[in-house]
Image (spheres, rainbow, N blue to C red):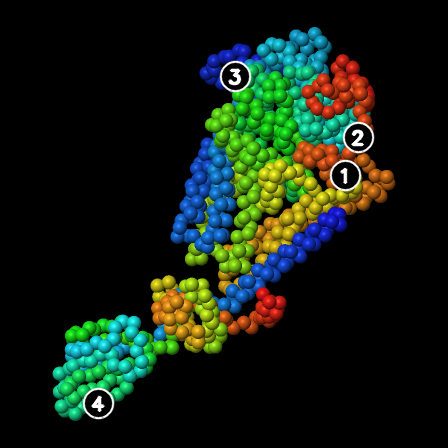
Amino acid sequence: MTWSNRFRLVAGLLAVVLVCAALTLVMNRRLAQATSESATIRAESLGIGTDYAGTVSEALVEDGDEVAAGDPLFTVSSLTLQHDLALGLVSTDTAAYQVDDDGTITLVAPYDAVVTEVAARQGAFVEAGSTIATLDRAGSLTVDAQVELDPSDFARVRTGAPVRILLPDRSELTGEVASVSVTDDEEENRVLATVEVTSDELADGANDGLVSSGTPVVASIDLHVDGPLAGVNETFGDFLRKVGL
Amino acid sequence: MAVSEFDRLVVTPRRTQYVRSASFGPPAEPARSTAPPRDENSAARSPSLVLIMLIATLGVVAYAVFLLNPANRGDALPYVMVITAETVLVTQALLAMWTVLSSGHDTRGFSFHHAKDRLFDVPEIIRDNAEDDPTRWNLYLHDEPVTVDVFITTYGEDLDTIARTVRAAVAIRGTHRTWVLDDGRSDDVRDLAAQLGARYVRRLSSNGAKAGNVNHALAIAKGDYFVILDADFVPRPEFLVETVPFFVKDDVAFVQTPQTYGNLDNLISRGAGYMQAVFYRFVQPGRNRFNAAFCVGTNVIFRRAAIDDIGGMHTDSKSEDVWTSLMLHERGWRTVYIPTTLAVGDTPETVEAYTKQQLRWATGGFEIMLQHNPLSPRRTLTLDQRLQYTVTATHYLAGIAPLVLLLVPPLQIYLDLTPMNLTISWGTWLLYYAGFYVLQIAIAFFTLGSFRWEVLMLASVSFPIYTKALWNAMTGKEQAWHVTGQKGAVRSPFTFMMPQVLFFAFLLITSAVGAWKEWGDAMPSLALAWNVTNTFILGAFVVTAFRESVAAKSVARSERGQRPGGVRRRGRAVAPGLPSGASFLGASRQARHDPVRPPVPAASSDRADSRRSAGALAVSSLPDGASSGPVVPAGGVA
């Protein structure tokens, strides 16, 4: 074998090692992450309803209206309420409603929110205990991610671990794991983890309205790494950051 | 008392002349004391072959359906890779099976046997007192004497190898002239030819490699038929007796006989040899049925008129044999292939020789695919021939398929890209996979009587050669190897298999990474299992090469010790008796590396210009004794 051939061989082997190293880093990075099967932005939601059956005498809000705390939403006039008032069984005002003496109840927004799913119009009859509308609390957006995990990986999802949230327009937000719970997927015979992700960047209506309740996203959760190569990835990441990549 | 060949000739009944009706009762002749002659290709004529082929076809179809089922589809990139590679493999397998099924056809008809009966003129032999010398028996076709030349092309092979071949060629039964066409320009070979009674031809150019050499010889030898033998193929005495009668049909251009190998004693030669066995025992006889059997450059006898018709052997390609056959078929000539072993030679036994041989063949195939599409309406071929030449042209694509398939498991290990749906179990996959591959192995078992893992190994590690061949055919480039210029030095096999070594390293690291990744999993993934298997296959090849390298070094060392000053070997220390492929590449390489040639005397170059073959020539022992070349050896001493 000539020296030029030896040189070629060694150079080739070096190239192979480099390619493998790069691919291993990519693999590691992926292994240190769990990517959601499905994830959606959700808001803390509250069903607005009344304990008294009656007629909606006034619907003050519609779907999508933003309301401030204390804003009136619906007025329901109820004969039962009138009766209870007469008996003195009802306390008049709470944060959720105000009761008038003529037997009408005005439901108010307990906090700043967006109205979704209005179930009753003016003049409609509502039953006791039914939900008339749903309020999504402003600033309460979280991401619910369904993640398929190996049993050993359950322990690697730590509260507070960073999560990358990919919006449908490919823009990325960062968040962190708030809680983990387990759901059984009976149909496909597997176990899914439901991870709740919170983020300061989840402001309602941001990114051209993409950040809102119900938007499908992809969440990549960083898993806790304590394997032999745990440090290598970070060092490499630091190196890349340092050289400006 | 031993029965001489002449006794046998006289005693053997002329079966085609006296046709007797079969009589009832016990045969009049006494029971045969020896077993009947074995059918050379019994497996090809076996009805069980049809059954096995049918089952294998079902297996192939099931495998194809399994792969193409949308429910089984995985990630796009590896899926497309797998589908592409498997499509090529499956198509080639189906076409090969079809060809093999056609191989049970016997080419020898009445006209052949009739001509064979009348090949020799017994009274003439007695008149010439040649009873004891079958080499002086004149050959007759249509009751006319025919003349045959036997060409032995040499290019720097071992003297012993050449001597063996020349001796056997001279001893072939039937009058013929034996010519040594020496492109190696060795005086030793010249002396050897003279000593063994062969004529010696040397030319001063290397144009057209072997085809050029033969064309040059055709300008001198004027026989009606000519045999081409590589220097390492030792013909059997009955070579002409078994082949010449086919020419009784006027449209037969050549009769090709198989390459049989006598040196199946190391891993490379076994792999390469058995790889060829299927081709020579089943594919070529099958192609014969399509009238598309092609010449393989040696162990072949041509009708001179046919070669004259296409203007000489094709010289523009590395695979002049296939191209020559294609040209003949386009001119409407018929070709014959018989699976009877009439010459035994050597198959490559070094990585270098194997690489060069495969590269030459594959480049030739791809050249046909790229430059001379057999399916084009401009070609005057029959549908049968179009199909078969398309198979030839695309055959080596199947050799590239392993490259694609080798990359699939690493894709899954590193990137989690899976070609198939992950929910498919090992068992399901194995069932369909076996449907294709295991049945192919079963076919090999049935047809060849055994299956050699070496074949599988060589087939799966040869992809860099075929990829290179495709590239060379596309760019019209000639392969340059970075080898030592020093003659006689040991050439490491690793020079010729760097891609394989690098691939081995890649797969080895990938296997390690995969094992680490899946550490603790109950069941290793299919990808890891495959990757480890592939690593072992490539590893076996690397180990083979390593052993070869060590052996070559020790041989070189002992030779240096024994014969200081060295032996003239044209840089071929390891491989005695290289096959033709190596000598062609060698020829072109040598043409580049030896720019200094002695100026050719005017007398001989004048003669050269009047001849068909380009370049100067030096001829010795012409029949008319008119040679005036610079090299005047004494030859043709009978």
Element at badge 1? loop
Q: Check the residue under mark 2 and report the chain it is in.
A: B
Residue B230 rendering spot, x and y as whole percentages? 68, 29
| CA gap, disc 3 and disc 4 | 120 Å
x then y, percent, for residue B318: 64, 33
Distance between the alpha carbons at the discs numbered 3 and 1 = 50 Å
Are tags 2 and 3 found on a single chain? yes
Which residue type carries mark 1? Gly
Amino acid bearing label 3:
Phe
- Dot label at residue B110: 3
Residue denoted by label 1: B571
User: Quarter-wise, where is residue A27 in the image?
Assistant: bottom right
Q: Which residue is drawn at the image coordinates 30% and 78% (left, top)? A: A67
Looking at the rendered image, the quarter that the N terminus of chain B falls into is top right
Q: Which amino acid does label 2 sit on?
A: Arg
Are the residues flagged by discs 4 and 2 in contact, CB closer than 8 Å? Answer: no
Question: Circle 2 is placed at which residue position?
Answer: B597
Q: Residues within 10 Å of mark 2 (few under 14, many from 20)?
A: few
Closer to the camera, B133 or B30?
B133
Q: Do the residues labelled 4 and 1 touch (CB within 8 Å)?
A: no
Nearer the observer: mark 3 or 4; the answer is 4
Does residue A176 sit above or below B240 in this rendering?
Answer: below
Q: Residue drawn at (76%, 13%), measured in percent from left and top?
A: B624
B95 versus B382 height, above or below: below
Asked if residue B122 can be seen in this view, the reply is: yes
Tag count: 4
Q: Mark 1 lies on which chain?
A: B
> Marks 2 and 3, Cα distance to the nearest angstrom?
53 Å
